[in-house]
């Protein structure tokens, strides 16, 4: 559902990518042994799924239009939503829409303190520039009781708001790290090329928001929600003293990160995918203080906002502080309406999780993610699996292929893939939508399960 902002296309661009590692559509992992099990349907566009950590197997499913639903371990939706934020969210369009409820995360001590966090698109603040669009709001909430069946809407505590110049590129994804801090991805403010309409002061400085350290746009933020008012700054945030950049910043140079997760095993990598402009979709492993390039770079190449379809030959290799950019671990070509380009999986990347569950041993340690769709209008998302090279193997780049499913051997599940989710056992869920709209109820939750043996 993320970037619908295109710059138009040119067939000639295809020639520029001859060096890209070829991917054939039929190339899938051998022997589909994985099925999609339908858990729930009739949902709004589902942007997030988190487990209630009390052994009940219940899951919270956040819908972009603002409802948070509670489903039981069999997928049955409770009669009353867990929380309804619709009245707090700006009016949403019937078609393409990047605003709404965008992130949901439970406090690591949720079972004891009943606290959780949401990011949503709130009305423009009175002190924001008049022509800007809305405010991205991070709030803390509490449940209404210890049964965790509903939340208390009156418990809202606003932690931070960010003025947004445009309707798109909000990101707004949330995850707690193993360090107990809350990580929040924020998009570059929107329009396209991180430029906006500068003549009208549309909220993009000359160097772009991604590279600018006095704005929270285009960043990964890290907050300590347990200390401070309304929050604290972790001591080792790269600009914690506020002298060279805003103290909330953890990493920067992101465009529209639609997916954040920590590997619950291995080195607990922080994995953030970044939706590209016109050429590349990225998977990034985020490190403290890292500069991920946007809008000086996209994928493994330079980026020129005046000519976004062609990599400049004199691209910068270091940021304004002289430090090299951090490359993605994987990038694939953005389809952007170019028909059936075999080197692309689709138009926009959807982040996922490193599989650490028990049910599907073949996926252990692999990163399961997706492309949203091969078309803005037709539901044609592809599930993908990345193999992560072992530490010390001398390569940082991941290899990717479609996730072969019993029902869909090429990984294309005939839905828009809005997001993925992970439960307490490390099993994974696919949050799908049947239409490119957040105001209808064609959302579904599928679970990835081992293929049943034939009788
Ligand atoms: Ca990048």
Image (cartoon, rainbow, N blue to C red):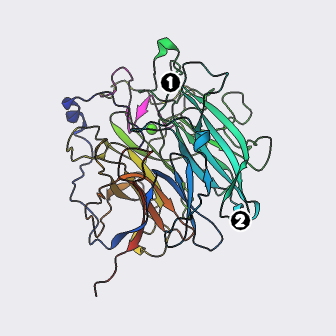
Residue 354 position, x and y percent, is 48, 61
Tell me the residue that label 2 is attached to.
Answer: 111
In depth, the one of 35 and 180 nearer the eye is 35
Tell me the residue that label 1 is attached to.
Answer: 208
- Vertical side of 7 occupied by 366: above or below: below
Residue 383 position, x and y percent, is 35, 57
Task: Name the residue: 63% across, 26% down.
Answer: 214
Q: Secondary structure at mark 1?
A: loop
Q: Secondary structure at mark 2?
A: helix
Dominant secondary structure of the residues highlighted in magenta in the image: loop
Report how far apart the C-alphas of labels 2 and 1 lie in the structure. Answer: 41 Å
Confirm whether residue 106 shows in the render: yes
In depth, the one of 22 and 91 nearer the eye is 91
Q: Looking at the image, which residue sits at the far right?
A: 228
Q: Is residue 317 left or right of residue 414?
A: right
Discs 2/1, front: 2
In depth, the one of 100 and 331 nearer the eye is 100
Q: Is residue 430 magenta?
A: no
Magenta residues span 292-309
């Amino acid at each position: 559902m993320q970037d619908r902002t295109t710059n138009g296309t040119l067939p000639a661009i295809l020639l520029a990518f001859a060096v890209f590692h070829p991917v054939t559509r039929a190339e899938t992992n051998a022997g589909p042994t994985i099925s999609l099990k339908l858990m729930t349907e009739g949902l709004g566009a589902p942007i997030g799924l988190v487990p209630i950590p009390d052994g009940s197997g219940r899951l919270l499913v956040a819908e972009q239009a603002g409802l948070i639903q509670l489903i039981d371990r069999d997928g049955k939706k409770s009669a009353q939503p867990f929380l309804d934020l619709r009245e707090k969210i700006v009016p949403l369009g019937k078609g393409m829409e990047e605003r709404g409820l965008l992130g949901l995360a439970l406090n690591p001590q949720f079972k004891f303190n009943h606290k959780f966090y949401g990011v949503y698109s709130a009305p423009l603040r009175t002190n924001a520039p008049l022509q800007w669009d809305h405010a991205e709001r991070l709030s803390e909430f509490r449940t209404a009781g210890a049964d965790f069946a509903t939340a208390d809407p009156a418990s809202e505590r606003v932690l931070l708001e960010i003025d947004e110049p445009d309707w798109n590129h909000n990101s707004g994804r949330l995850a707690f790290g193993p360090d107990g801090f809350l990580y929040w991805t924020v998009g570059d403010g929107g329009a396209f090329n991180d430029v906006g309409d500068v003549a009208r002061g549309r909220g993009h400085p000359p160097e772009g928001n991604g590279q600018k350290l006095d704005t929270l746009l285009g960043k990964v933020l890290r907050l300590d929600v347990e200390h401070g008012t309304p929050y604290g700054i972790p001591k080792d945030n790269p600009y914690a003293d506020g002298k060279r950049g805003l103290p909330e910043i953890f990493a920067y140079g992101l465009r529209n990160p639609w997916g954040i997760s920590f590997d619950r095993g291995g080195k607990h990598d922080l994995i953030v995918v970044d939706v590209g402009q016109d050429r590349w979709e990225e998977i990034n492993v985020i490190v403290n203080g890292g500069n991920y390039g946007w809008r000086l770079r996209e994928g493994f190449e330079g980026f020129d906002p005046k000519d976004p379809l062609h990599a400049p030959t004199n691209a910068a290799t270091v940021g304004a502080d002289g430090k090299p950019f951090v490359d993605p671990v994987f990038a694939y070509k953005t389809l952007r309406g170019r028909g059936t380009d075999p080197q692309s999986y689709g138009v926009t990347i959807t982040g996922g999780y490193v599989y650490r569950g028990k049910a599907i041993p073949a996926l252990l340690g692999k990163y399961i993610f997706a492309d949203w769709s091969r078309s803005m209008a037709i539901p044609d998302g592809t599930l993908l699996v990345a193999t992560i090279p072992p530490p010390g193997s001398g390569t940082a780049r991941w290899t990717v292929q479609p996730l072969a499913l019993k029902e869909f051997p090429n990984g294309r599940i005939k839905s828009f893939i809005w997001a993925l989710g992970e439960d307490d056992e490390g099993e994974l869920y696919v949050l799908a939508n049947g239409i490119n709209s957040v105001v209808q109820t064609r959302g579904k939750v599928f679970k990835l399960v081992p293929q049943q043996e034939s009788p």
